[in-house]
Amino acid sequence: MTTTTATRTTTDPATIDPSRRARVAEAAYQIRMGVLEQGEAQGEGYVGQALGIADVLAAAYCDTLRYRAEDPDWEGRDRFLLSIGHYALALYSALAAGGVIPREELLSYAADGSRLPMSGMATYTPGMEISGGSLGHGLGQAVGMALGLRQQGRDGQLVYNLLSDGELNEGSTWEAAMSASHWRLGNLIAIVDLNGLQADGRTAQILGGEPQHERWAAFGWSVQRIDGNDLDAVLAAFDTAIANATVEGQPQVILCDTRLARGVPILEAKEKLHFLRVAAEEWPVAMAQLTAGYQAADYQNEEK
Amino acid sequence: MSTTTATVTTPQRSAAMIASIADAGVPTTSAPFGHALNALAARDPRIVGLTADLAKYTDMHLFAAEYPDRFFEMGMAEQVMIGAAAGMAAVGLVPFASTYSVFATRRAYDFLCLDAAEPKLNVNIVAALPGLTTGYGPSHQATEDVAILRGMPDLTIFDPADAVDVEGIVPAAAAIEGPTYTRLLRGKVPRILDQYDYTFEVGKAKVVRPGDDAVIVSSGLMTMRALLAAEKLSSEHKVEVSVVHCATLKPFDEETVVAELDTDRAAFTAENHTVVGGLFETVAAALVKRGIGKKVGAIGLPDEFIDAGALPTLHDRYGLSTDSVVARVLAGLH
């Protein structure tokens, strides 16, 4: 990592290598399929959010993060904090795609005695860094980890925190945002899933958070805002963030506009997407749609 | 009830945030926490300090001056301070984080519970102004901090009586694999336990002073008051009082305490805390669990918001002064 932020580099999404994109797209497909399998096992869950964030997690766990699948506690790893604990099934699926947990274990999601509880908990799951069900906790812990790693001279490691737009309602998130820029945590990268929906309805109506770019910038962060379901944009944003990561400098945030239930039209069409309850006969349809969409090729880039 | 005037000057200043809890003639040690933390940090490089804009008022300023590179001023933001302390512990450091008790408990409970306790991280909260140790009013009087925290699994709770306890707690807390909460006494802290055959030990209640007529189970600064009251009861009333000090409130040493209470002596608990949810109820539960029916008088703060005012006045008004303890024991003997 560099030690200054004098010149920032930006990766152009158009320069992303097609074979790299194809590899991550395959991972995103696997993650989505794993999400549907977990959803089918329980008949319900936070499936919409998980499908929406799958492209970001695919880029993180199958391209970007430094970790050892066979040794999830490896000291030299990057830290990826899931403060939105209800997205756990998405992270479980990503951990399976990354080889940290066995793929078949996903079917135990939310079952009695499972290592994969409905809300993500650090003490249950290998590779789950924090227990994130209570919102607004991740970024503060990320601040401490980034400070602690720097304190110990472990300058090569980065701390990521995946948050959601609903989580930005919590004041503690903004305490942490202030703290990160005050401490010049250039080794900290926040990722915010802007899916626009929370428990009681549209985020814009519950407690609107726009303009997001300006808010984070005003708190001293370096901001990128991307289409979180555009794989080239996601990969370029990670490349940009890592190129600009510093031992001491501006913390960075990647704001990701995502679409709930992305990649599965039968679910995207549903009205109640915050917590999905899906009829048994709909799951095979959802899986078939996901596969058809993936095989139709290049759907990640359809809006280009 | 206020019969001694030795410590009283008039007019009483009521607005002081920090007031002395030392009775007249009791020796004190200045900032025992800060000195103990520095001593520990000198031999353990993992020790770091954090505060939420209260370094000067929690004796953390001594650490900040000695170890500026290991000190983190987190600002008036208790939630992120505790979250960040958990993050530091997760990457191998041993943080001590200081603020006032009210803010650590009422304001940042969720963060202490989920970020530190559930993953059993070595996060050490040192919380000043526990119970009634300021006349600043309910915003700063943590009269229910133990009641709030006792239900939190895996949290160790310390309630030191004096500087001797504080000096013992600091290295002990760092050695515990899990979070700790210490009801910090700061500034000029009374030093009284070294006059007795006493050593601090995690999780142990100690009979500091024996006595055949009555027994007081106490914690925190009320142990100091209980000991002073016991000396006075002995010399002035020929009443011998046993004092059992509980420096660790959780895990609680039920065996020692129950053994002392299951006798014919008049029994009391004494705590710098509301009588709801603190030492008294901890002791009561221990007795009930063993099927022991025993009358125990609860010396502590009432279940109400405490007045603002001068601390000596308030301790008298709410029954925490040495003379109040003397009166309660005498009344309980008849």
Image (tube, coloured by chain):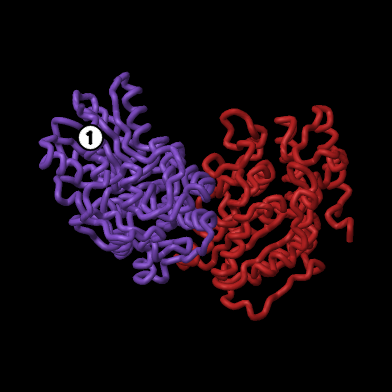
**Hue of chain A?**
red
Res B318 → quadrant = top left
Rendering coords of residue B182 (x, y %): 37, 49
Q: How many marks?
A: 1
x 20%, y 29%: residue? B333
Against A142, residue A218 (above or below) is: below
For this rendering, which residue is in front, B116 or A235? B116
Against B244, residue B133 (above or below) is: below
Q: Can you identify the residue that label 1 sits on?
A: B329
Against A238, residue B319 (above or below) is: above
Question: In the image, A105: left or right of A122?
Answer: right
The subunit letter for the residue under badge 1 reads B
For this rendering, which residue is in front, B228 or A7? B228
- Which kind of residue does numbered mark 1 sit on? Val
Q: Is residue B279 visible from the viewing direction of this image?
A: yes
For this rendering, which residue is in front, A109 or B134? B134
Which quadrant is home to the C terminus of chain A?
Answer: bottom right
**Hue of chain B?**
purple
Rendering coords of residue A57 (x, y %): 69, 52
